[in-house]
């Protein structure tokens, strides 16, 4: 066997292993809680590089223990056509492309909740075309194997909502001293507001207090 054939065979095996492992992981996460994400690891590494110690706060809860106000606020703000598309909103993607082109930098992503979930769970936040390709691949997989309710459940449990704070349950406890189920409509709106910049906008919402 020539070196070229060996290389081609090696590449084919690597591709097959990637597809098999990625599909297996998606199926596992269809049922198992997502306890750790690449972004959590990145935040830990960033803190370590600064000589700091970051304690991650991440409490997984089923979607039944998340306030309907939170769910509706997230869908309204992040992806109003969530239940209508198959993972991608092409109109939003085109709009984002032309908006970024006008601004000369990336100011909009046009990503759906499904795409954001795929990115949060399986990819890094790097703004590269390679990451977007992997994001698209995993988006198609979770739409196929998870369904809308599971995608929402995972998204709400892994979204970054503060420095080291992941998921709406941890955010509710940290910012309002309550549970995700008890969040009011106004508090839900506040949490959704900080999603695009969770560490930069956090100061704009109030800390723990009784509603």
Image (cartoon, rainbow, N blue to C red):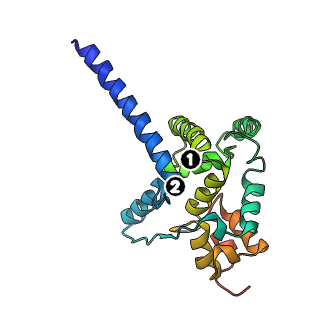
* Marks 1/2: CA–CA distance: 16 Å
Residue in the foreground of this view, choosing between 176 and 109: 176
N-term-proximal mark, 1 vs 2:
2
- Residue 133 to residue 37: above or below: above
Left-right relation of 46 to 196: left
Q: In the rendered image, which quarter contains the N terminus?
A: top left
State left or right for residue 167 relative to residue 68.
left
Q: Quadrant of residue 103?
A: top right
Query: Vertical placement of 66 versus 102: above or below?
Result: below
Q: Quadrant of residue 183?
A: bottom right
Q: Which mark is residue 118?
A: 1
Q: Position of residue 190 (x, y in %)?
A: 72, 69
The structure residue drawn at horizontal position 78% and vertical position 50%, both measured from the top left corner, is 80
Residue, x 65% and y 80% (percent of image)? 176
Q: Which residue is mark 2?
A: 31
Q: Residues within 10 Å of mark 1 (few under 14, many from 20)?
A: many
Q: Residue at x 47, y 50 (%)?
A: 28
């Amino acid at each position: 066997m020539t070196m070229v054939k060996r290389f081609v065979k090696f590449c084919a095996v690597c591709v097959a292993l990637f597809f098999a492992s990625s599909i297996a992981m998606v199926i596992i996460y269809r049922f198992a809680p997502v306890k750790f994400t690449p972004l959590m690891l990145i935040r830990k590494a960033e803190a370590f590089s600064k000589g700091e110690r970051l304690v991650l706060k991440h409490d997984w809860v089923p979607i039944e223990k998340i306030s309907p106000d939170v769910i509706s606020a997230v869908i309204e703000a992040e992806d109003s056509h969530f239940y209508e598309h198959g993972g991608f909103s092409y109109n939003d993607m085109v709009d984002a492309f032309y908006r970024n082109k006008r601004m000369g930098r990336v100011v909009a992503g046009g990503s759906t909740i499904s795409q954001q979930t795929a990115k949060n769970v399986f990819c890094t936040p790097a703004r590269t075309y390679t990451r977007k390709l992997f994001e698209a691949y995993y988006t198609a997989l979770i739409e196929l194997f998870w369904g809308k309710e599971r995608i929402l459940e995972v998204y709400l449990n892994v979204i970054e909502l503060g420095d080291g704070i992941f998921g709406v349950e941890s955010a509710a406890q940290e910012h309002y001293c309550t549970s995700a189920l008890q969040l009011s409509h106004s508090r839900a709106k506040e949490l959704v507001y900080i999603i695009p910049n969770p560490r930069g906008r956090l100061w704009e919402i109030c800390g723990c207090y009784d509603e």
